[in-house]
Image (cartoon, grey):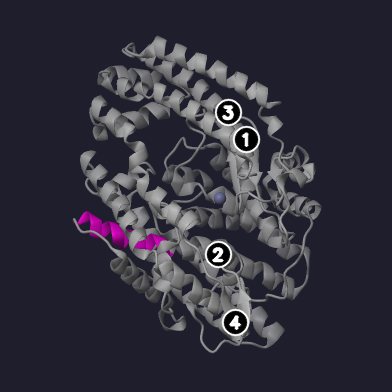
């Protein structure tokens, strides 16, 4: 399909950024106002943070400035996300970002100066604080790991250089790498990063799919040494930081911000690797049989079970589906869904220069904005439900909490979103009494929701842990080491049921997440809590719904274990994870049963 220019997109398919500022002029005025306010902030508080009263006052004022910075940054940044080919938007955003960075660094003195105050002053401040209490407590907890103000200043000024490994990775991936077309049975096919990930990996023609796989990994291989060097620099730097900041090891340092114990982190990786594998291997065997493959390989894992069955949907229908599926969460949630469509929070359009994929960006005590690339497919409805899950959390937590406390630890960030995918699937299975449709819904849950969060990202997590173990012992990694680890990783999980072809070990080159700390494992952690909450809602109704909404509203006021307790689960024990894996197994059982009934094929 030919992509259109942004200017030709119908307005009803775009989001309405005038919900933030009525026009650009107002945004510039707000920026000027915020600059003045920040200058006054520096004049009032720099060198004066010596009493509990002043500290609280300072953090409360900083909250108001940060909030305004967020709104200005969103207005400019979100516009650019819809068209990176628009030079005016690009220049405007560069200017706005530059101004906002200056404001943030002007306020950076506050943290280190607050920590210079005597212990009893800090305690007194935390006692009288309301919105900034947890911020202060976190700051105090970080004190043991802070360096002298001068060293912190030097490190802050080096922050751009410390991001170079990630910049190198992205430059390789987005600018340098180029794929030659490949040929199958005399026909030539174009190849590119997103063409491979969004199309060829899911292609049901086995010859095309496997040829694309070989061509993709052949090209990737040419960039492996640069990529490995960038990655080694990144993890070595994290190790150095952990040592400088007096953490016991690099894991402790990376888990500190997430407020997660090492046990909770390890459990997620070990239990899923061991106990989910038999279920996923059975699903892989079923895929192989259904598609009549000689041998199931790593290149075949993402194909749909029933590719001819792909329900089409219009945007208007998506509204009805999502509203009805999420109505179980109550009238206010339903109203939010209606507002999202009516007030144009969602950018549906597909146009030249727009960001790929989807995301949700929330504004404190205002609405959220959702970027999509709408394709008329039921899979897009799942994406909307997912992103509205983030919007729902933003709505409840920003109503109830301060700006500082609105967001939970990264560990649970994907719980509200994946919950909505599960609720949509649950709802869809009840709308139609049709076996093929039911199998389509259930296999979407396995091949999208669970595969993405419990397999793709979890294999990354397993590999990442091995890398950090090497680094922690003072070692380093190169392309051969990384490929060796990744091959072992895939073979461990898929056993003899899935052949890991040559090239697949380079899968370590495909993820930007490795440059963001211990991120990959959190996908499965969020979905574990979501799965348990969905099953509880199915069984208990109202009480479980209320607990879930209290969980959402709690934002970041507790650590992940404390938040999960509000939803009704103890994630310090393995029980929720084991029950989730059992649930995944039961869904795969049902898919197998349906396939036997519909096609007479046994897994
Ligand atoms: Zn998400």
Residues drawn in magenta: 459-473
Of the pair 332 and 150, the residue shown nearer to us: 150
Image vertical order of residue 123 relative to residue 174, above or below: above
In the rendered structure, does residue 346 fall within the stretch colored magenta?
A: no
592 lies above or below 257: below
Q: Which mark is residue 192?
A: 2
Q: Secondary structure at mark 2?
A: loop
Quick check: marks 2 and 3 in contact, CB under 8 Å?
no
Q: Earlier in the sequence, mark 3 or mark 4?
A: 3
Mark 3–mark 4 Cα distance, whole angstroms, equals 50 Å
Q: Can you identify the residue that label 3 sits on? A: 72
- Mark 2 or mark 3, which has the lower sequence index? 3
Secondary structure under tag 3 reads: helix
Image disc number at residue 184:
4
Residue density around tag 1, few if under 14, some if 14–19, many if 20 or more, within 10 Å: few
> Ligand 1 within 8 A of label 1's CB?
no
Query: Residue under circle 1?
Result: 88
> Disc 2 vs disc 3: which is toward the camera?
2
Real-space Cα separation, disc 1 to disc 2, in angstroms: 28 Å
């Amino acid at each position: 399909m030919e992509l259109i220019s942004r200017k030709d997109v119908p307005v009803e398919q775009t989001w309405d950024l005038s919900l933030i500022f009525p026009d650009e002029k107002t945004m510039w005025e707000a920026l000027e106002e915020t600059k003045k306010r920040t200058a006054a902030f520096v004049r009032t508080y720099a060198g004066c943070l010596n009493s509990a009263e002043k500290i609280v006052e300072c953090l409360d004022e900083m909250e108001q400035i940060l909030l305004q910075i967020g709104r200005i940054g969103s207005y400019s940044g979100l516009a650019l996300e819809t068209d990176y080919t628009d030079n005016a938007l690009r220049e405007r955003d560069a200017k706005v970002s530059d101004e906002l960075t200056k404001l943030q660094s002007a306020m950076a003195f506050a943290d280190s100066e607050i920590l210079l105050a005597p212990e009893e002053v800090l305690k007194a401040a935390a006692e009288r604080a309301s919105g900034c209490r947890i911020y202060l407590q976190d700051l105090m907890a970080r004190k043991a790991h802070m360096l002298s103000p001068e060293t912190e200043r030097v490190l802050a000024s080096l922050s751009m250089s410390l991001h170079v490994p990630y910049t190198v990775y992205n430059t390789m991936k987005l600018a340098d790498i180029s794929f030659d077309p490949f040929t199958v049975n005399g026909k030539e096919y174009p190849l590119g990063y997103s063409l491979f990930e969004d199309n060829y990996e899911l292609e049901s023609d086995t010859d095309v799919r496997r040829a694309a796989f070989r061509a993709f990994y052949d090209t990737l291989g040419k960039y492996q040494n640069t990529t490995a060097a960038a990655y080694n620099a990144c993890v070595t730097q994290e190790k150095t930081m952990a040592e400088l900041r007096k953490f016991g090891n690099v894991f402790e340092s990376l888990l500190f911000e997430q407020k997660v114990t090492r046990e909770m982190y390890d459990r997620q990786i070990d239990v899923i690797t061991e106990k989910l594998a038999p279920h996923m291997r059975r699903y892989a065997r079923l895929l192989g049989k259904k598609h009549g493959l000689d041998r199931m390989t790593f290149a075949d894992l993402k194909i749909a079970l029933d590719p001819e069955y792909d329900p089409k949907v219009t945007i208007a229908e998506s509204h009805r589906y999502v509203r009805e599926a999420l109505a179980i969460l109550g009238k206010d949630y339903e109203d939010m869904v209606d507002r999202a469509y009516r007030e144009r929070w969602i950018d549906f359009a597909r146009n030249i220069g727009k960001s790929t994929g989807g995301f949700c960006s929330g504004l404190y005590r205002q609405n959220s904005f959702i970027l999509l690339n709408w394709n008329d497919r039921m899979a897009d409805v799942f994406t909307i439900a997912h992103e509205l899950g983030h919007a729902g959390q933003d709505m409840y937590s920003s109503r109830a909490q301060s700006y500082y406390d609105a967001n939970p630890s990264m560990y649970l960030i994907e719980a509200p979103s994946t919950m909505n995918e599960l609720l949509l699937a649950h709802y869809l299975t009840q709308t139609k009494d049709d076996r093929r449709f039911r199998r389509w819904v259930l296999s979407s849950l396995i091949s999208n929701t669970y595969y993405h969060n419990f397999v793709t990202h979890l294999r990354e997590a397993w590999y990442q842990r091995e890398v950090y173990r090497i680094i922690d012992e003072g070692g380093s990694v190169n392309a051969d080491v990384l490929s060796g680890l990744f091959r072992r990783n895939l073979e461990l999980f898929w056993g003899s049921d899935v052949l890991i072809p040559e090239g697949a070990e380079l899968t370590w080159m495909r993820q930007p997440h490795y440059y963001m700390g211990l991120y990959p494992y959190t996908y499965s952690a969020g979905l574990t809590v979501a799965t348990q909450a969905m099953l509880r809602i199915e069984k208990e109704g109202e009480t479980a719904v209320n607990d879930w909404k209290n969980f959402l509203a709690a934002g970041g006021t507790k650590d992940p274990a404390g938040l999960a307790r509000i939803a009704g689960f103890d994630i310090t024990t393995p029980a929720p994870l084991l029950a989730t894996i059992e649930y995944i197994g039961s869904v795969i059982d049902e898919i197998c049963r349906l396939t036997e009934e519909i096609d007479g094929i046994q897994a």
